[in-house]
Image: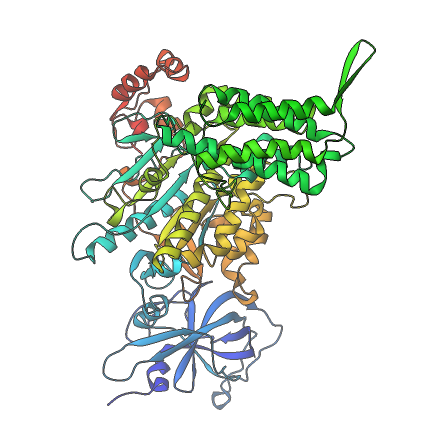
Amino acid sequence: MTQTVFECAEGLRVGTVDFVSPSEIKVLLDIEAPDSVALNAGGVRSFPRVNGYVLIPVDDAYVVGQVEWITIERSAFPKRSGVRDFGVVDLPYPLRRMSTNPVGTLRKQAGPGDEYTFRRGANALPSVGGAILLPTERQLRSIVESGDQQRIQMGTSPLAASATVSVDPDRIFGRHLAVLGNTGSGKSCSVAGLIRWSLEEARSNRSEGRPNARFIILDPNGEYTRAFNDEEGGLQARVFRVEPTSEDESALKVPLWFWNSEEWASFTQASAKTQRPLLARALREVKAGRTGFGETSEEEKRLRLRRYLSSVMITIRKDLTTGAIRDDENKFGFRLRAIRDDLDTRRAAMPTFGLDAIRKAIDESLDSAYKSFVKNGETIEYFIAFSEARIEAVLDPLQASLDKLGGIVYQEGPDEDVPIPFNGSDLADHIEILAKQENLSQFLDFLVSRIRTFLSDSRINSVVSAKDFTSLERWLTDYIGADAAAEGEIAVLDLSLVPSDVVHVVTAVAARMVFEALQRYRRLKGEVLPTVIVMEEAHTFVKRYNSDAENQNAGAICCKVFERIAREGRKFGLGLVLSSQRPSELSPTVLSQCNSFLLHRISNDRDQELVARLVPDNLRGLLRELPSLPSQHAILLGWASELPVLTRMRDLPREHRPQSDDPDFWEVWTGKGRDGKSVERSIDWKAVARVWQGDRGATDTAQGEDDGSDALEE
């Protein structure tokens, strides 16, 4: 005969409800209740511990309570009447009390068997005097293993009979995940494990071929370069680094023509009033004047000249319409002179399109308005107002040349942010030309100097140079992935040797390019392409900044990119995984958009306070374990889990872990490893110096000597 909930519960009772509120249920434990292990109900059951679970029967279901604290209440007088029939009088006896937080409802499924379903929230709360029950092992598993789509096993729950803790990738990656904890607490292994376990499970559920998955890891410390080189397991990672050390790795490239105007302005520290508008204009005109690198055909040259003359025509017409030809500062004359000088460099290459006539008309106009005088031995030049007739005389040969080239081109695009190839030196040259046109050379000399210094730095040039790089399509294929991840599901961008001057810009550009590529994919296909960006050491790249500052530095621009991804990425299939040891330094905007959290050991007070705000008030007791969590243990909470749960993460083999272990001082000092094998670290500063100074041959030699050593096992 089927037993009711109350009949099944009688042997598991340990106390009664003493106080009820929507956020807390206080319990008076029975005097006879065991201290640690319950032997009743036909089996050995662990007595509730802090953050463990108890059940409270209500109607046809159970309210699940998570234990927040347990205490002893001492009294100077007995609080029960004793056994009067036998003349026994009770002595004062300490009473045990417990506080629990209602987290959900457990309901038995219809039909035979001992199956339950758990849902967050409680429709009805118990009354005072209700029974408090120990959950059975099946009930504990039903609580922790709840959820409709638990596809990826990430660990077990030590507080719930080692129940399996699984997650749905749509939840944990689709709405952003933050992995937070002190250094050495296991964050990197958790991130690497989630990626590995997800891909392994996807492969086992795919009928044929590799999983059509894309993970892009932005790795500032070079921890993940060997974590996914697992041919036996079927994983394959594409590794990009500044100085490739093997044939399996590729040179990291984030060409400068990917950078948008805001990124250029932050890197060059361009001022908002004068330098930034000219920089944006220079980017727009340089991109409009080029169709690629190394163009040699006559058609390409004609198109470039046509775009340039169109820009000149539009600029002069605008000045004529707005009256700039008669402005008080006389900038138009200097602008016209700069156009003439620019034409001189083009006439020799393109002699048949009437450029001589344009130059002659400009010279005549300049002569008509040019004036000068000598002051303190210095010649001061200026221009008086130009007549409209003189300017029309310049526009006529311009129009004639454009007619020969195919007519004027109105630049609806590209704008300054479209990734169209150009050479950095062309940008610096063009800014100088615009400075002369606007008579602003004194304000732009430092900007041009910074760009030229930047381009001459070989360390930076190796990353941002467009040399040996073919197209935007090639970059998207290499860094995001081709169809069905034909070349591997994981791309690791090793940023460890990227110069600090540009590391924030390079990181921002790489993340933004992925985001904007997925935006355009959805626009073309009408559906999203699920992709995940992993940002290690997120407190460095997603750091809160002063939004009121007039000129944002590169760090602020990098953070703004991730804030946009956090706000809008889900709509375009882009998930974000942040890993950080200092959550209090992260951007509040990004952190607020993370719907799932994996919290490892956190000991800093400020970080604990911030994390405590992520959960409801009645569940904050679980976070009190954060300072004492051992390695490989974490608390999973948020959208990815039906309820906050303490998790022991799955074991990750040593060869699959990121290179983030604590230094093994004692083993190196004594020369003995834990397994009894000899541990010796040879010192070859000569090889280090050669690699440091750019001798690539030394890299291969050092790599060959160190393969298999303990230092590089992880």
Closer to the camera in the image, 523 or 495:
523
Q: Quadrant of residue 378?
A: top right
Q: Is residue 126 above or below residue 120?
A: below
* Outermost residue to the right: 376
The percent coordinates of residue 578 (x first, y second) are 45, 47
Which quadrant of the figure contains the C terminus?
top left
In the rendered image, is residue 185 in sight? Answer: no
* Outermost residue to the left: 208
Q: Is residue 602 above or below residue 330?
A: below
Residue at the location (32% across, 22% down)?
671
The percent coordinates of residue 432 (x first, y second) are 60, 24
In the rendered image, is residue 605 in sight? Answer: yes
Residue at the location (46% across, 44% down)?
512
Closer to the camera in the image, 668 or 554:
554
The percent coordinates of residue 189 (x first, y second) are 36, 44
The percent coordinates of residue 703 (x first, y second) are 28, 22
Left or right, 609 with respect to 306, comes to: right
Q: How is the image coloured?
A: rainbow
Left or right, 380 with respect to 13, comes to: right
* Outermost residue to the top: 377
Which quadrant of the figure contains the N terminus?
bottom left
Residue at the location (68% across, 34% down)?
389
Left or right, 391 with respect to 509, comes to: right
Closer to the camera in the image, 177 or 263:
263
Q: Is residue 528 above or below residue 675?
A: below
